[in-house]
Image: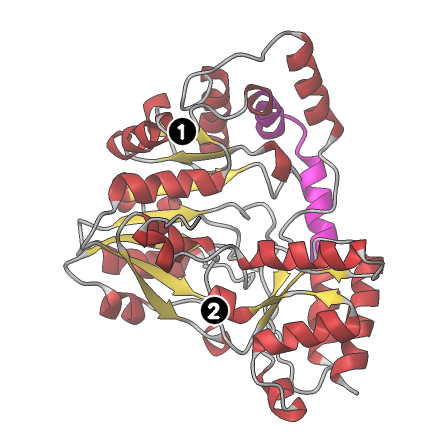
C-alpha cells in the first residue's frame, strides 16, 4: 500500500545535520571510532544551579499545563534579560516562550507569511530558514555573502533583493554556520534600507548572543535600530549559551500583534513548552552567569586552534569568526587538488577515510565549503584535525 503526502513536502528536505549525526551513530554502532564535528550542541553539561532548580520544580509539583506562551515568572525573567543585556523593554504581551528558538521562528513564519510573500535569507544560512518559509507557502530569496564579504550582506545587496512582496528578513548574528557577527554600525546601515520598506519584519536570531568574542560588542538589531523596534522580532533561547539543548526553551519578543499570531499557531501545535524546563530557564536567565563565560572562553580557545590548523592545509581557507562554535572553511582548492567533485563528496571522503563527520556547505547555501562544529573537547578536536590533515594532505 502506497500513501501520498502533501504537495508541500516535495520542496522540504530532512535536516542535513540530522542525517550526518545518524550516519555517525550508525558507524559507531558498527565499531568505528567516529569523531563527529557535525552537531551544533555544547559538550558541556547544564550548570548545576539550573539542574537543581528543575529538580525542585519536580518535587514541588510544577508538572501541569502552563499558559501557552509561558509562565508569568519566565516572562518576567525574559523581560529582565532584555532590559539588562539589550536595553530593550517589552511587556508580557510582547513575549512568547516556545519549545526552542526554532519553534519561535517557525511560528513567526506561519503567522506572518503566505503564498505570494517573500523572505530574504542571507547565505550561508542556518539550514531550517528556507524550509520554514516554504512550509508557510512563501518563497525564500537567497542573498549570498562569501568569505571575501566576511559572510555578511551589504546594504546594497539588501536593497537589490527587496521587492513589493518582501515580508520578512532573517538576520542571524553571530551566525550559524559562519561565526560572523554584525557590528552595531553594520546593523544600522541595513536598518537605513529597511526604514523605506514598512511592510518588512526583521527576524533577529540572537541564539548565539553570549558565545561571542569579536572586537565589537554584541549588538541586537532592535538595539542598533530602535526606529525598527515595532517591526523586529528578537529570538533567543537557553540551548546554546547554557548548554541546555535538550531542555527545549526558546523565546521571542516583538510587536504584540505578531506575538499573538505566534501564540495562536503554538496553541494549535505544541501548546505550552515543558513546565519543568521553564523553571530551569528562569534559573539560567536570572542566576549565576559565570558558567556562560567559562564555556565561551573554551569555545574561543577551540576556535583559535581550529582556524589556524585548517589554514595550514593546502587548498583550505578559513575565516576567523566572532562567535558561535562553528567554522566554515572554503575547500575549493582541496577539491581541485584532489579531484573531488563537490563538498558533499569531500564530506563522504572524510567520514569514510578519516572517521570524521562534518556537514557539507551546500546544506547551508555555501557549496565549496564544509561546516565543522568545535563544540567538543580540545582532545577530540586535535585528533579530528590530525585525521583530516592525514587524508587531505595525502
Q: Residues within 10 Å of mark 2 (few under 14, many from 20)?
A: many
Q: Is 327 drawn above or below residue 167 in the view shown?
A: below
Closest to the camera, between mark 1 and mark 2, is: 1
Residue 168 locus on image (x, y percent): 28, 52
Residue 234's label in the rendered image is: none
Closer to the camera in the image, 234 or 354: 354
The location of residue 161, given as percent across then percent down, is: 25, 67
Q: Nearer the viewer, residue 297 or 114?
A: 114
Separation of disc 1 and disc 2 at Cα? 30 Å
Q: Is residue 54 above or below residue 355?
A: above
Q: Is residue 376 left or right of residue 199?
A: right
Identify the residue at the far left of this view. 164
Query: Where is residue 387 shown, x and y percent of the image?
Result: 81, 73
Q: Which residue is mark 1?
A: 96
Residue under label 2: 151
Q: Residue at x 73, y 44 (%)?
A: 294
Q: Left of 378 or right of it: where is 367?
A: left
Question: Which numbered disc flags the more N-terminal residue, 1 or 2?
Answer: 1
* Residue at position x 65%, y 92% in the image: 337
185 is higher (above) or lower (below) than 50: below
Q: Quadrant of the C terminus?
A: bottom right
Chief secondary structure of the magenta portion: helix
Is there any visible trace of residue 351 in the rendered image? yes
Give the magenta part as a residue range. Answer: 279-300
* Residue occupying the point 32% across, 49% down: 202
Q: Where residue 87 sits in the image (x, y, percent)?
A: 43, 36
Asked whether 335 falls inside the magenta stretch, the response is: no
Amino acid at each position: 500500500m502506497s500513501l501520498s503526502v502533501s504537495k508541500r513536502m516535495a520542496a522540504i528536505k530532512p535536516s542535513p545535520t540530522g542525517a550526518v549525526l545518524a550516519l555517525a551513530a550508525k558507524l559507531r554502532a558498527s565499531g568505528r571510532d567516529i569523531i563527529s564535528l557535525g552537531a551544533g550542541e555544547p559538550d558541556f553539561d547544564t550548570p548545576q544551579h539550573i539542574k537543581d532548580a528543575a529538580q525542585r520544580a519536580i518535587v514541588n509539583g510544577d508538572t501541569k499545563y502552563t499558559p501557552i506562551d509561558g509562565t508569568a515568572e519566565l516572562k518576567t525573567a525574559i523581560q529582565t534579560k532584555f532590559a539588562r543585556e539589550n536595553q530593550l523593554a517589552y511587556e508580557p504581551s510582547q513575549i512568547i516562550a516556545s519549545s526552542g528558538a526554532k519553534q519561535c521562528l517557525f511560528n513567526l513564519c506561519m503567522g506572518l507569511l503566505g503564498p505570494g510573500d517573500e523572505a530574504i535569507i542571507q547565505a550561508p544560512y542556518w539550514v531550517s530558514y528556507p524550509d520554514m518559509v516554504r512550509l508557510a507557502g512563501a518563497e525564500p530569496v537567497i542573498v549570498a555573502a562569501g568569505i571575501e564579504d566576511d559572510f555578511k550582506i551589504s546594504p546594497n545587496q539588501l536593497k537589490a533583493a527587496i521587492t513589493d512582496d518582501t515580508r520578512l528578513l532573517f538576520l542571524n548574528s553571530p551566525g550559524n554556520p559562519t561565526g560572523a557577527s554584525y557590528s552595531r554600525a553594520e546593523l544600522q546601515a541595513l536598518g537605513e534600507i529597511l526604514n523605506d520598506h514598512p511592510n518588512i519584519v526583521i527576524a533577529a536570531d540572537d541564539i548565539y548572543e553570549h558565545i561571542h568574542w569579536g572586537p565589537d560588542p554584541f549588538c541586537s538589531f532592535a538595539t542598533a535600530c530602535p526606529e525598527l523596534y515595532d517591526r523586529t522580532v528578537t529570538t533567543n533561547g537557553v540551548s546554546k549559551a547554557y548548554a541546555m539543548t535538550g531542555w527545549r526553551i526558546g523565546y521571542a519578543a516583538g510587536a504584540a500583534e505578531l506575538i499573538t499570531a505566534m501564540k495562536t499557531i503554538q496553541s494549535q501545535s505544541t501548546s505550552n513548552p515543558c513546565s519543568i524546563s521553564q523553571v530551569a530557564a528562569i534559573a539560567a536567565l536570572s542566576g549565576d552567569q559565570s558558567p556562560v563565560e567559562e564555556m565561551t572562553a573554551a569555545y574561543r580557545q577551540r576556535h583559535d586552534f581550529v582556524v589556524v590548523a585548517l589554514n595550514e592545509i593546502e587548498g583550505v581557507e578559513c575565516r576567523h569568526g566572532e562567535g558561535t562554535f562553528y567554522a566554515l572553511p572554503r575547500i575549493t582548492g582541496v577539491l581541485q587538488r584532489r579531484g573531488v567533485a563537490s563538498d558533499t563528496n569531500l564530506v563522504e571522503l572524510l567520514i569514510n577515510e578519516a572517521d570524521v563527520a562534518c556537514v557539507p556547505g551546500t546544506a547551508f547555501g555555501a557549496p565549496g565549503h564544509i561546516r565543522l562544529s568545535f563544540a567538543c573537547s580540545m582532545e577530540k578536536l586535535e585528533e579530528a584535525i590530525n585525521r583530516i590533515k592525514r587524508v587531505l594532505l595525502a
